[in-house]
Amino acid sequence: MPDTRLIRTFLEPHHTKLAEQAGGFAIKEIASRPEPIEDADARREARALLGLIGGGGWLQPILDLDLRACCLMREALGEASPLADAVFALQGLGTTPILLGGSQAQKDRWVGPIAQGKVMTAFAMTEPGAGSDVGSIATTARREGSGYALDGTKTLISNAGIADLYTVFASTDPAKGPKGISCFLVPGDAPGLRFVGPQVLSAPHPLGEIAFEDCRVPADALLGTEGRGYGLGLATLDRLRPTVAAAACGMAARALTEALMHVKQRQQFGLPLARFQLVQQKLARMATDLTAARLLTYRAAFEKDQGQERITSEAAMAKSFATEMAQRAVDDAVQLIGGRGVLADHPVERLYRAVRALRIYEGTTEILQLIMAGEILKTADR
Ligand SMILES: Cc1cc2nc3c(=O)[nH]c(=O)nc-3n(C[C@H](O)[C@H](O)[C@H](O)COP(=O)(O)OP(=O)(O)OC[C@H]3O[C@@H](n4cnc5c(N)ncnc54)[C@H](O)[C@@H]3O)c2cc1C
């Protein structure tokens, strides 16, 4: 359960209440669900989790654009189940472009069912040739009659094959580079949209490739105006990066809890492991790093909620620090638990598989470091 004492300066009373309630929900209804082993089971479980999370009204913070509340949700879910966290995260990624750039008619059509968990969304940006270099997207959307025809391939897409609605980035004017990228809402059953197949991760996560083959969508599938997609995509990532940091904090907190339980009861050399100073050093480092990551995370979310237009640097700091921290913390927890920590289905073994991707998606650590350095150098030049 997210500990709100440390971050209380960044929270309002409704956040403290939410943290308690979301923590209770995650512990009671999510944590006890068995981890799916096969990819097909993970896909079914993702849908079941969406029903549970949406049905309980837990997606509301996304629609309210309440970033601190989204962070609290992801911290609570990340601690209980990385798959449940991913389900929440993907509703956020798929929906935020609609909230930031959609017309009232688009919002009226999609937002209600998304909030109830009846429509599962996906965010289709990455391509075989366009990963970190988002501006090099090669999927095209050409004007065809009164609508558009999309062609191209998207890879490493979460919820691929199970989403009801894809937020798709495609170029309406390739000669303009990033300024020619537009954003479209494409229903999962649109003619010409094909699920190529799953890309199976070591942790349960419905990932896969999709292809657009003369995929026809009406003109009102366009979000905002032509050429606005790149800005919408980056604004979405900027806004949601602190939530990735929060999920990382939830996973690290769980790792620390598991490690603490173990070192207090496990005896070697006639003493509980917790009595050995090398063990204590690891615990101290995990707790310090987690504290620092949570402060960076909620600082970034607080600034956004206060109306700061861009939190590029704050979000990059929070996401890169927290995800690197979580990887170290989970690794330390496995080390402290020893052989049992690498056995399949131990909570820290599950975290070990799940935490790795967080340093890669929504901006790799290296790309975020480039962003931060750019901001620092700009300030130094003034
Ligand atoms: C679990 C998971 C879920 C994902 N879900 C989605 C999704 O739902 N939607 C979506 O659109 N995408 C998704 N992705 C894709 C993700 O956003 C990309 O993997 C990420 O942007 C990196 O792109 P890439 O994998 O092509 O790596 P590359 O861009 O090829 O990078 C490879 C390495 O090179 C480094 N690198 C690249 N450029 C530079 C540079 N200029 N300087 C220094 N180092 C550099 C990177 O940091 C990285 O270490 C997901 C990925 C994963 C792993």
Image (cartoon, rainbow, N blue to C red):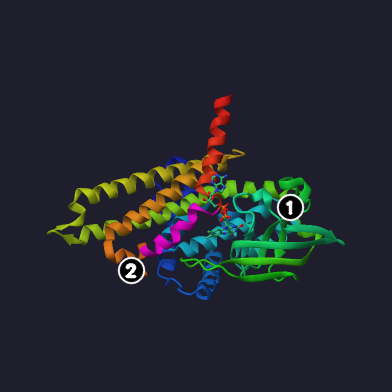
Residue density around tag 1, few if under 14, some if 14–19, many if 20 or more, within 10 Å: many
Residue at left offset 51%, top offset 41%: 369
> Is residue 98 shown to the viewer in this render?
yes
Badge 1 marks a residue whose secondary structure is strand
Q: Residue 300: horizontal and vertical position, in percent?
A: 51, 42
Residue at left offset 67%, top offset 48%: 135
Asked if residue 53 is positioned above or below residue 38 in the image, the reply reads above
- Quadrant location of the C terminus? top right
> Is residue 11 shown to the viewer in this render?
no
Q: Residue 291: horizontal and vertical position, in percent?
A: 38, 45
Distance between the Cα atoms at labels 2 and 1?
46 Å
Residue at left offset 58%, top offset 54%: 62
User: In the picture provided, is 137 more to the left or to the right than 30?
Assistant: right
For the stretch drawn in magenta, the main secondary structure is: helix
Q: Amino acid at mark 1?
A: Ser
User: Is 359 inside the magenta-drawn segment?
Assistant: yes
Badge 2 marks a residue whose secondary structure is loop
Q: Residue 371: horizontal and vertical position, in percent?
A: 56, 40
Q: Which residue is mark 1?
A: 182
Camera-near label (2 vs 1) is: 2
Give me the disc on residue 343: 2
Q: What span is in magenta?
A: 349-361
User: Is 239 inside the magenta-drawn segment?
Assistant: no
Asked if residue 376 is positioned above or below residue 271 in the image, the reply reads above
